Image (cartoon, helix red, strand yellow):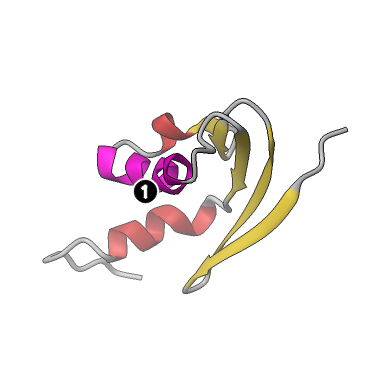
Amino acid sequence: MKKFHLGTGRRKSSVARVRVAEGSGKILVNDRPYDQFFTEEKDRGAVVGPLILLDMRNRLDVFVKRPRGRHHRSIRCHVPGRRYAH
C-alpha cells in the first residue's frame, strides 16, 4: 500500500485537495492528465516546475481533486472588460 502525503490549497472560496506519493511522475487533476486540464504551457510549467527543480518530476505521483461547480463561474467573472449577470 502506498503512503500518501496530503495537502490542501485554497484561494478565495476554492479548495483543492492534493495527494503526493512515491511513483513514476504521474500527475492527475480531477482524474485527467494535467496536460489535458491545463491547456497553456505557462500553467503546466507552474505545476511541474517545483518538481523539476527538486529533481522529483519522475519520482512522485501527484493527484489533485478540485470541485468543478464554481470553477467555470469564477473564470467568467474575471474576464477583463466583460460583465455577467449573477
Q: Amino acid at mark 1?
A: Ala
Picture quarter with the C terminus: bottom left
Label 1: state its secondary structure. Answer: helix
Residue at x 76% of width, y 45% of height = 4
* Relative horizontal placement of residue 16, taking residue 74 as reference (left or right): right
In depth, the one of 53 and 42 nearer the eye is 53
Circle 1 residues within 10 Å: few <14, some 14–19, many ≥20: few
> Any magenta on residue 71?
no
Q: Residue at x 30, y 58 (%)?
A: 76
In the image, 45 versus 70, the foreground residue is 45
Q: Main secondary structure of the magenta part?
A: helix
Residue 33 located left or right of residue 3: left
Residue identifier under label 1: 46
Residue at the right extreme of this rendering:
1
Is residue 49 covered in magenta? yes
Q: Which residues are magenta?
A: 41-53
Going 61% across and 47% down the picture, which residue do you hit? 65
Which residue occupies the extreme left position in the image? Answer: 81
In the image, residue 19 lies at what x, y percent? 68, 47
**Identity of the residue drawn at 38% across and 62% down:** 74
Relative side of 43 to 24, left or right: left
Residue 15 x/y as whole percent: 57, 63
> Which percent across, then down, holds residue 12?
47, 74
In the rendered image, the quadrant that contains the N terminus is top right
